């Protein structure tokens, strides 16, 4: 039997490392890649314990959600800042949202928080204060000063070969 007002919480690696407290009023989700990122024994134990108890659902989102996230993260200037695991977690959020759920992502990663806010998800930060505003990033070359509307391959300027940087866009 489903309880009303159940929260749907997606747990990032930091949730297991920091010891996020599980509640009966929440359903928990993550992706398999999170376990691969956990190096601490206690974090691995938290993950495995939550999974074996049935509290944690480990889901790999379908490719269509990853494809949608890739497009949206590129337009936001976040694509090259998000790890493959971050992208999977955010793709899982898109999947849950498509099922009529309101995902909440537990993450201290500012790029994950920025994308979560852009996608209409809430986020919870455990250690940091979290982002205050959603940021649209502009990509530029510090060498030749060329500005780009979309990320470039390997995050390198095609004109001069310098590694590209990003800065918040105005307005």
Image: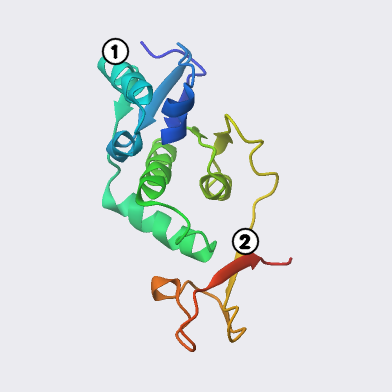
In-image side of 167 versus 13 (left or right): right
For this rendering, which residue is in front, 167 or 77? 167
Extreme-bottom residue of the structure: 159
**Which residue carries the number 2 mark?**
136
- Judged from the image, the secondary structure of the residue bearing numbered disc 2 is loop
Q: Could you tell me which residue is drawn at 47 percent across and 13 percent down? A: 23
The x and y percentages for residue 104 are 51, 32
Q: Is residue 43 visible?
A: yes
**Which residue carries the number 1 mark?**
53
In-image side of 4 versus 153 (left or right): right
The x and y percentages for residue 25 are 48, 14
For this rendering, which residue is in front, 9 or 97? 9
The x and y percentages for residue 33 are 30, 40
Identify the disc placed on residue 2.
none
Q: Could you tell me which residue is drawn at 49 percent across and 74 percent down? A: 163
Residues under labels 2 and 1: Cα distance?
A: 40 Å
Give the quadrant of residue 50: top left
Q: Could you tell me which residue is drawn at 45 percent across and 16 percent down? A: 22
């Amino acid at each position: 039997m489903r309880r009303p007002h159940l929260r749907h919480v997606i747990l990032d690696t930091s949730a297991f490392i920091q010891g996020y407290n599980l509640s009966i009023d929440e359903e928990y989700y993550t992706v398999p890649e999170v376990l691969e990122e956990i190096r601490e024994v206690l974090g691995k134990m938290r993950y495995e314990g939550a999974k074996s108890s049935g509290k944690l659902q480990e889901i790999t989102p379908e490719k269509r959600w990853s494809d949608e996230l890739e497009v949206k993260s590129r337009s936001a200037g976040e694509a090259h800042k998000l790890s493959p695991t971050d992208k999977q977690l955010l793709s899982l959020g898109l999947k849950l949202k498509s099922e009529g759920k309101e995902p909440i992502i537990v993450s201290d990663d500012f790029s994950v928080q920025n994308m979560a806010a852009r996608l209409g998800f809430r986020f919870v930060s455990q250690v940091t204060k979290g982002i205050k505003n959603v940021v649209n990033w502009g990509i530029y070359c510090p060498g030749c000063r060329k500005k780009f509307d979309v990320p470039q391959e390997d995050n390198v300027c095609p004109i001069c070969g310098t590694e590209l940087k990003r800065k918040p866009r105005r307005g």
